[in-house]
Image (cartoon, rainbow, N blue to C red):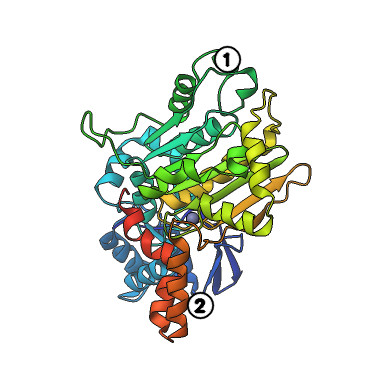
Amino acid sequence: MHPMVKPALRRGWRDLNTVQFGMAPAHAMVLGPVDTATGSFLDLLNGTRGLPLLRDLGRAMGLPDGHVDALVERLARSGLLDDATGGGRAADALREKKAVLDRLRPDLASLSLVARAPGDALKHLAARRSLRVQVRGAGRVGVVLASLLAAAGVGQVEVRDIGSVEPWDVAPGGLPSASIGERREEAARRAVRRAAPDRPPRTAAEGEELGLSLVILAPRDGLAVHAPDPAVAEPLITSGTPHLYAGVVEGTGVVGPLVLPGDTGCAGCLDQQRIDRDPTWPRLIAQWRSGASHQVPACDLALATGVAGLAAGHALAFLDGRLPSSAGARWESSVPGFDWHAKPVWSHPACPCGAAEKSKKGERAAEDGQPHETMAVQQPHAARLSGTWRAHV
Ligand SMILES: [Zn+2]
């Protein structure tokens, strides 16, 4: 192990014996008491030295025996320590690709704030390289989103769409103006390849399809995100494929829900929820779906880019094994206020996806007074994340 104080957090001394790691409250931490000698020793924990050498240097600085190990242990327990040599085989392989790792260095530093154990940040970053994500829709949101995922280290990002690139599909970070008139899928594939830090290693044997870790539905027509069609999502629900919605409808950007089939509210749940609230919803939605518009749909470029960025963040958090706030919720933002707010997508008992049944079981367990089981059921996603949903990682 080559211990390294996580460089992502800026250090500051609150007084002679108390050191604060980090500025922003989300990840900042205060450590104390720390004596002056230990304080200067912290500078040596920069990932260039192994423990035996650090112990020698500590002794030379007058630190008592065992002090260095205790300090390293304390920092690791607080989530402040990384290991410049840890993370396993995939991490070692990525470390050897210096140019690639340099591209991803800020992302690695950010990951180190949530992957707490030493070596875990690079392990997660390297794991992204073996994932396959499909983005459906090559418009202003879809291609930017796909490019972001590829640039953040996701190994295989494929974009699905039909037709040719129109002038209004062009977006910074997405399809370039030179691609107007080309096949959307082909243009999107090139954009994604340009964004990626390198060509990722082939993990599946030739001809063998790597399982999809996530499907992102980012249609050019935002109606399919505002009012997602349960029939379209049905194969994803049946196959248990996690999927996320992202798009712009009129002047509103939408990110979510992230659907973990059978666990969190899906397109069908959302549909039922709306029918409960508004009996005329089916009539409206039928008109919207049948009246194919030949107009160029409204889509604020900044809003579309914001949607792509937020959705990519939620997708990456999920792929890294976390549960983003779009699971069971939709984040929405409208022009010109641009304030993001979340609306819940409850699982619905009339939806065949089974998520409501599962949460009901949780409630029953709570009534029976079984706190342990209740806790497990109240966090089904977290439980599944460590099991089924992480299967592709
Ligand atoms: Zn459902």
Q: Secondary structure at mark 1?
A: loop
The three-letter code of the residue at mark 1 reads Ile
Residue matched to label 1: 180
The N terminus, quarter of image: bottom left
Q: Which is nearer the N-term, disc 1 or disc 2?
A: 2
Residue drawn at (39%, 53%), measured in percent from left and top?
Answer: 121
> Which quadrant of the structure image shows residue 104?
top left
Residue 233 shown left or right of residue 122 in the figure: right
User: x and y percent of residue 177 in the render?
Assistant: 60, 17
Residue drawn at (49%, 23%), measured in percent from left and top?
Answer: 162
Q: 10 Å neighbourhood of mark 1: few (<14), some, or many (≥20)?
A: some
User: x and y percent of residue 190 in the render?
Assistant: 45, 22
Q: Which mark is residue 285?
A: none
> Which quadrant of the structure image shows residue 220?
top right
> Which quadrant of the structure image shows residue 379?
bottom left
Residue drawn at (42%, 58%), measured in percent from left and top?
Answer: 262
Residue at the farthest left position? 205
Residue 363 shown left or right of residue 305 in the figure: left
Q: Secondary structure at mark 2?
A: loop
Q: Nearer the viewer, residue 46 or 365?
A: 365
Residue drawn at (35%, 70%), measured in percent from left and top?
Answer: 73
Q: Is residue 37 visible?
A: no
Q: Nearer the viewer, residue 336 or 75?
A: 336
Q: Nearer the viewer, residue 320 or 367?
A: 367
Vertical order, 40 against 136 (above or below): below
Residue 306 shown left or right of residue 269 in the figure: right
Residue matched to label 2: 33
User: x and y percent of residue 37 in the render?
Assistant: 45, 70
The three-letter code of the residue at mark 2 reads Pro
Q: Is residue 234 visible?
A: yes
